[in-house]
């Protein structure tokens, strides 16, 4: 693997960095304080091509590679986690699932406007009674002619009140539901205008306060057959495929948060003086800053490796999960140390590290808790789990323009 970034990757990195620094960084403290989600940011990201960064040009995207996506997510979360969450949900979980699993008609109908930022997409797997236990969901879809009647609730859904449509999962086989056989789950594309769809926002979150998080209730929603993604019974495989892509963006974003903590701590350690010298000269402060530098470099190497594998069209479930696990756990540790370096000021939003600390906590929970990832990597090491090929993978880059 050549670690030298190509010109198109550097261009994507610069473009996203300039957007985040100019459009969001000056306002992020106020957006976080007021818990205000600015929908105009979605429009600007769409106009710049960020929302379709690694979608092929024939579907309205920028045609960039997956390493460019990782670099973009690092730059977005460097400013604030809510920006990277938009990419994780809209692009990672939803759009890339459509690219891999959708029919050509579905790609034209849903993926193309998403890539251009003309419509916003979300992903719904978690329910009030089911998170890590995916087969514990209760949503059902009953076949009725050329429709499915879908009922259930999804929660902790990012962009719930901003999305135009949602990728959701439900049981289509009641016998397999009782048996907890995941081959009875099916994936659907539900649109906001469908009768019986309603959404709401979750307030009072610990972190990611500038982002939108909520729930969707589906009350006997009639979903056309051509809105089914994949075949009946392929929902679990699609959900896990989506998590592969989402976890990649989370890993890259958490690495950006580590870098933000490092930069903020270095600046403060050079300015703040105690006992007659900058605190950066004290050994224990140096130890914390050295740990941040280590975690940034390791996190970056891990997500770059996963991105390289995606570029080759290789399955990278293990590598992506490892990158997500390491970077998110490290970001929580790093953010805690950054608060310590800032002392009492780190406990105030006068400096950004308290926001980084609150934001970091979510990433060790969503898209696989730290405990789930610990068990996952142990199973790989022990040989209890293998990377088995799925029916589809992401297309290798550069994309074939046909």
Image: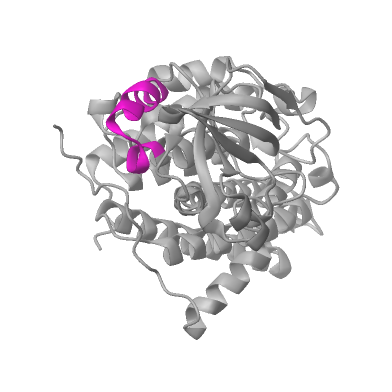
Q: Is residue 289 above or below residue 235?
A: below
Q: Nearer the viewer, residue 240 or 353?
A: 240
Q: Which of the pair 60/303 is nearer the observer?
A: 60
Q: Does the rendering let one see residue 8? A: yes
Quarter of the image with the N terminus is bottom left
Residue 159's quadrant in the figure?
top right
Residue shown at the point (65%, 36%) measured from the top left: 157
Q: Position of residue 165 (x, y in %)?
A: 53, 25
Q: Which residues are magenta?
A: 98-115
Q: Is residue 331 visible?
A: no
Q: In this figure, what is the number of numbered marks? A: 0
**Direction from residue 133 to residue 296 in the image, left or right:** left
Which secondary structure is most common in the magenta stretch? helix
Quadrant location of the C terminus? top left
Q: Residue at x 77, y 44 (%)?
A: 128
Q: Position of residue 315 (x, y in %)?
A: 34, 61
Give residue 127's position: percent from left, percent from top: 71, 44
Question: Looking at the image, which is closer to me, 284 or 299?
Answer: 299
As for residue 300 lying within the magenta part, the answer is no
Specify the color scheme: one colour
User: Which quadrant of the structure image shows residue 33?
Assistant: top right
């Amino acid at each position: 693997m050549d670690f030298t970034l190509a010109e198109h990757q550097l261009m994507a990195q610069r473009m996203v960095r300039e957007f985040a620094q100019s459009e969001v960084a000056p306002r992020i403290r106020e957006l976080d304080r007021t818990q205000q989600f600015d929908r105009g940011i979605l429009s600007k990201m769409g106009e710049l091509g960020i929302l379709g960064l690694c979608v092929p040009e024939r579907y309205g995207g920028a045609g960039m590679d997956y390493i460019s996506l990782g670099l973009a997510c690092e730059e977005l979360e460097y400013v604030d986690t809510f920006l990277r969450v938009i990419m994780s949900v809209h692009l990672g979980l939803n759009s890339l699932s459509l690219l891999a699993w959708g029919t050509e008609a579905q790609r034209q109908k849903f993926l193309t406007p998403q890539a251009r930022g003309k419509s916003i997409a979300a992903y719904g797997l978690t329910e009030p009674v089911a998170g890590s236990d995916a087969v514990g969901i209760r949503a059902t879809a009953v076949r009725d002619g050329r429709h499915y009647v879908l009922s259930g609730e999804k929660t902790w859904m990012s962009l719930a009140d901003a999305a135009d449509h949602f990728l959701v999962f439900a049981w289509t086989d009641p016998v397999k539901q009782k048996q907890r056989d995941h081959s009875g789950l099916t994936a659907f594309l539900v649109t906001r205008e469908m009768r019986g769809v309603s959404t709401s926002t979750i307030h009072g979150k610990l972190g990611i306060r500038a982002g939108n998080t909520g729930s969707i209730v589906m009350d006997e929603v009639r979903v056309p057959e051509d809105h089914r993604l994949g075949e009946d019974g392929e929902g679990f495989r699609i959900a896990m495929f989506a998590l592969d892509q989402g976890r990649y963006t989370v890993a890259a974003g958490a690495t950006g948060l580590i870098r933000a903590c490092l930069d903020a701590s270095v600046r403060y350690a050079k300015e703040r003086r105690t006992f007659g010298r900058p605190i950066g000269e004290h050994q224990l402060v140096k130890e914390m800053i050295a740990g941040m530098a280590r975690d940034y470099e390791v996190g970056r190497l891990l997500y770059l490796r996963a991105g390289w594998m995606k570029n080759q069209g290789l399955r990278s479930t293990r590598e992506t999960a490892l990158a997500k696990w390491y970077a998110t756990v490290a970001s929580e540790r790093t953010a805690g140390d950054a608060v310590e370096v800032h002392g009492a000021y780190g406990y105030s939003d006068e400096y950004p590290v308290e926001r980084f600390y609150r934001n970091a906590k979510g990433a060790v929970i969503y898209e696989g808790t730290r405990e789930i990832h610990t068990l996952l990597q142990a199973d790989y090491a022990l040989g209890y789990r293998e990377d088995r090929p799925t029916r589809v993978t992401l297309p290798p880059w550069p994309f074939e323009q046909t």
